[in-house]
Amino acid sequence: MTFSEKTILVTEGAGFIGSHTVVQLLNEGFRVSIIDNLDNFVTEAVDRVRDLFGPKRSQNLKFHLGDLRNKDLEKLFSQTQFDALNHFAGLKAVGESVANPRHYFDWHY
């Protein structure tokens, strides 16, 4: 299997580190899927990556609006088989977490 046949999932791929990782993966010839809830970022980061690679090469990039804390990830895994995962998702703003701690508390069983 060649790189162009492998699909990598990047969580929070619209973020700073995630979007740079997406660029590198696309440069290496991988197909890339992003899942991001856009809690701290906007889709413009993904649009910039698409602009950088042009329409043909951007066909190897898929964006999914979703949250890892609910059924969005389960749905994505049922639709696509991934060869690897780069996990960058997480709520991480220290000041906001002190000011609004309930936003950072999530209890799932």
Image: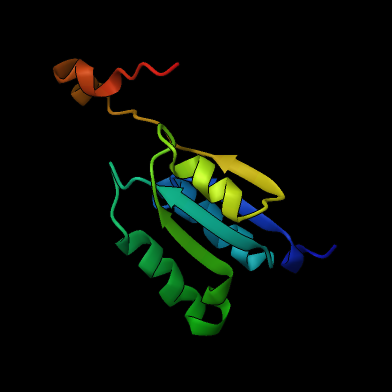
- Relative side of 61 to 40, left or right: right
Residue 23 % position (x, y)? 54, 61
Residue lying furthest right = 1
Residue 19 % position (x, y)? 46, 54
In this view, the residue in front, 46 or 80, is 80
Residue lying furthest left = 99
Q: Which residue is drawn at 38% across and 68% down?
A: 48
In this view, the residue in front, 106 or 78, is 78
- Where's the C terminus, which quadrant? top left
Q: Which residue is drawn at 36% across and 16% down?
A: 107
Q: In which quarter of the image is residue 108?
A: top left
Q: Which residue is drawn at 40% across and 47% down?
A: 36
User: How many numbered marks, from 0 up?
Assistant: 0
Q: Which residue is drawn at 28% across and 21% down?
A: 104
Residue 68 % position (x, y)? 44, 36
- Where's the N terminus, which quadrant? bottom right
Residue 18 % position (x, y)? 48, 48
Residue 93 sits above or below residue 54 on the image: above
